Amino acid sequence: MSTTTLTPTPTPTRRNRLSKGRLPRWAIPAVGLAALILGAAGSTLGGFSVASFLIYAALLFVVGATLATTAVEGRRQGTNSFFKYLVVGAFLLALIPLVSVLYTVLERGLPGMTSDFLFHSMNGMTGAVDNETVAAGTPVLGGAYHAVVGTLLITLCSTVISVPVGMLAAIYLVEYGQGKMLSRGITFFVDVMTGIPSIVAGLFAAALFGLMFGPSTRMGIVAAVALSVLMIPTVVRSTEEMLKIVPNELREASYALGVRKWRTITKVVIPTAISGIASGVTLAIARVIGETAPILVTAGLANSINFNVFSNWMATLPTFIYYQILNPTSPTNIDPSAQRAWAAALLLIIMVMVLNLGARLIARIFSPKTGR
Amino acid sequence: MSKRIDVSDLNVYYSKFRAVEDVNIKIDAKSVTAFIGPSGCGKSTFLRTLNRMHEVIPGATVEGKVLLDGDNLYDAGVDPVTVRSQIGMVFQRPNPFPTMSIRDNVLAGVKLNARRIGKSDADDLVESSLRGANLWNEVKDRLDKPGSGLSGGQQQRLCIARTIAVKPQVILMDEPCSALDPISTLAIEDLINEMKNDYTVVIVTHNMQQAARVSDKTAFFNIAGTGKPGKLIEFDETATIFNNPSVKATEDYVSGRFG
């Protein structure tokens, strides 16, 4: 038996051997401030501009902060902070176009968002009317109501066509066709179709209906078919991906209860994946709602309201914007047309945004519940 | 409400590869039969052939006969869906349906098959099934909460409740406790002991103590080497298998001297 005597270890105030030098808290903000000042000075040398100031300041900050960190905390930390600032910089860079587009559209579109714009068509709006309003300084008359109606109807029709087709195709690919030649073929052609230019889809639909109803048949449903050609691959792809990530265990659990395959798919697999499918469908809609070229060759262009997709020409917001810019209603006074175009652009962005919010809502409602 | 299973000359193939060879086994009604053996010896594969669940895996085929009270599961014209509604299965990992509440999970077998059921009948079925799975007292106040919010052991008992709600003749269990802690395992083992009053239970387990605790008879499966098919080595009373096996390999395995 040996007794161990506990001698208190002497605790001289020595440096912890695990610790390293650390920059004081104020160092990085200080480097930032210095970079801003030096950047301002540097850009003033060659004629001041905001862009050059920001670029100089950002470069100085990244270099300065990296050097400071390397000097005090060591090389590894220096490299780490260098890449951290690079990543943040790339993120900010990516934000610039987004914010700038939103800002421009809001700035130019908001003045045009009048009740006249929202609830009237361009019916009877001639260059003379625009000239008068400009001369008198009164609000711009005429609006995009017909185009809103056309956009909604055509997009709705193409959604009604492509969602069932796309979803069923995806179900075939995932649940029935694993490894079969047909499913590999479908996958290949779906991939090819995702890449076809939209004008080709427009020409295809125009030619198809031209064969059936005579040349230059232009109506809403032709445009809807053209848009479906663009939508179906996206819907198939996203639905397929979502169905694939449904765990096989759930399918087996359902089969083991004596449930048929089709009911397993509709009651277990699809509900589990529905939130992803819904957002995939929304993205597909958002993709086609802004198409211009295929609409022009299939639905033509209209100035008056048309609720019937099965007869006569129709306008949509993109074609409305296109014509207001390219062919201003009054060639001598283009401002009213430009204002309408920007307002229509704003409206289009709002529609896409509402769609996205709707998809999130659907996803929230249908997603598998958690909680106790 | 339980039937016996007689298997004769059963071979299971994955495409060309023979996974299980020449199994002959007689599983009594209202008994617990355990399958033990090293990993990859085909016990899970064989278990899945007892309710035709192996067909879910592409390329899996079966030769031989599986008689459920004399009716061959593999006769032409037998619908696997009918087979599975008579022979239920509980899986290794608890897999309640994430989109459904506890109540709906129990009723899944009924609702998914689009059978109509009145509200009071449904309530009775939920209660009796959950009681049968020893889960009623723990969840009776939150039947409308999602099943995925339960603990692992509770989820597994929910899956058992879901299986007995369709009133099967036989319940197959594929390592039902391997993802659970000892206390949940004990709960399930108690449950298995009660279940043999009403059902024929077949359980695959890696835990030999578990096999010894819960089963009446034990089957030992083994495999000669990788790439060789799994075989049924010995099938006897559990006490015999563990105390006095007639085959050397069985003795080596149950005493831990394997390999």
Image (cartoon, coloured by chain):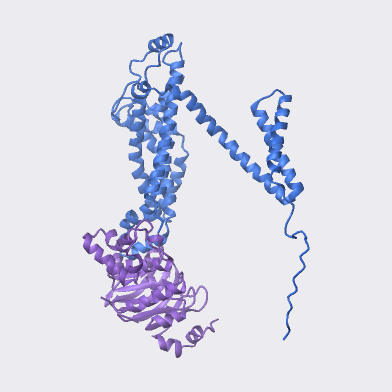
- On screen, residue A79 versus residue B121, left or right, reads right
Could you say which is closer to the camera, residue A10 or residue A207? A10
Q: Residue at x 74, y 52 (%)?
A: A21
Residue A186: x and y in percent read: 42, 47
Which quarter of the image is occupied by the N terminus of chain B?
bottom left
- Vertical order, B61 against A282 (above or below): below
- On screen, residue B179 versus residue A146, left or right, reads right
- Vertical order, B53 against A211 (above or below): below
- Vertical order, B92 against A134 (above or below): below
Residue B164: x and y in percent read: 30, 69
Which hue is chain A drawn in? blue
The chain whose colour is purple is B
Q: Residue at x 44, y 50 (%)?
A: A241
Q: Is residue B82 visible?
A: no
Which quarter of the image is occupied by the C terminus of chain B?
bottom right
Residue A79: x and y in percent read: 70, 48
- On screen, residue A53 versus residue B251, left or right, reads right
Q: Quadrant of residue B237?
A: bottom left
Residue A193: x and y in percent read: 44, 41
Q: Is residue A79 visible?
A: yes
Q: Residue at x 40, y 47 (%)?
A: A363
